[in-house]
Amino acid sequence: MSTEDITTLVHPAIAVFFVFPLIGMVVHYAWQTRQRRMQTAAEGKSKIAPVVGPEHLKLGRYLSASVVGIALLGNAQPIFSEMLKNQTWAKESFRVTFVILMFVLTISSLVLLYKARTSLWRGVFATLTGMGLILIGCQPEIYRRGSEWYVSHYYCGMSAAMLMIFSLAIVQDIYKDRSNGWRKAHVALNCIALFFFIGQAFTGTRDLLEIPLSWQKPYVEQLYIQNCQTAPCEVKAAPAPAPQAPPP
């Protein structure tokens, strides 16, 4: 495999051996935490160890950073590989500088979001992180599958990343809110995020099947041009039947 093929596999490889196992652990501790809370409220005690809550919080914070990080990595590979291939720096130097600056600012905003303590600054840095992701994803080098957005790996991933950013921003408010409003919102939104993660598993596997290796790409593109653009567009009418002689 070429360097381009290896860099293409970095994003799904990290998702398989790190992010998805982490999702499983976070979901497990979330369920254990909820069960412990319900048993304590009903019976006054629970056999589930109290450590499940802090473990869920710690792993959840890791998961949020991992999802945003892998989204940035998944966007960076096609953007910079296509820019280097097409020598975009010579043609659009301002856009290249803007994209690099967006990556730096998005990562910086995510780091500051982890360090922020007040609700105001958490909201500011969460907004900046989300805006940075969106601006990076709007670059023309990104294949978004816009005609089939409902099965798009890009849109599922970006939606999951936005929900992770929001969960990270409200985590301190969950423990301060006695009405459990933020907790209920956290549970509901992360159930939706779980469905996005499942969608990511399906769409990511599909995209790996569709992406050819670098040496195969010219042949696949030629087949696409010949079979997918020419043949379906040419609707050939059936030949008219030959006239028959009248019966004697």
Image (tube, rainbow, N blue to C red):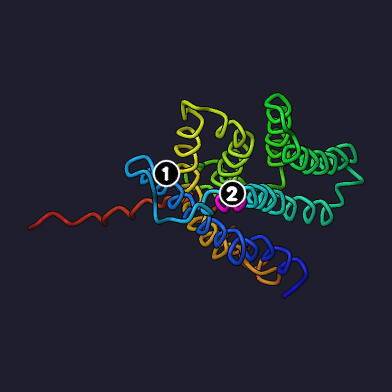
Q: Give how far apart the Cα atoms at labels 2 and 1 are.
A: 18 Å
Q: Residues within 10 Å of mark 2 (few under 14, many from 20)?
A: many
Amino acid marked by disc 2: Gly
In the rendered view, does 19 fall on the left or right side of 103? left
- x, y (%) of residue 9? 67, 66
Considering the numbered disc 1 on the image, is that residue within a helix, a strand or a loop? Answer: helix
- Left or right, 188 with respect to 93, comes to left
Position of the N terminus, as image quadrant, is bottom right
Query: Closer to the camera, 62 or 90?
Result: 62
Percent of width and height locating residue 21 = 55, 62
Please determine whether, in this image, residue 207 is positioned above or below residue 190.
Answer: below
Q: Amino acid at mark 1?
A: Arg
Question: Residue 37 got which mark?
Answer: 1
Relative image position of residue 231 (x, y in whole percent): 49, 56
- Bin the neighbour count of mark 1 within 10 Å (Cα to Cα): few under 14, some 14-19, many 20 and up: some
Residue depth check, mark 2 versus mark 1: number of the one nearer the observer: 1
- Residue 8 on the magenta span: no
- Residue extent of the magenta highlight: 54-60
Q: Which residue is depicted at the point 47% across and 56% down?
A: 49
> Residue 5's image quarter?
bottom right
Label 2 sits on residue: 60
Residue drawn 66% across the image and 60% down it: 11
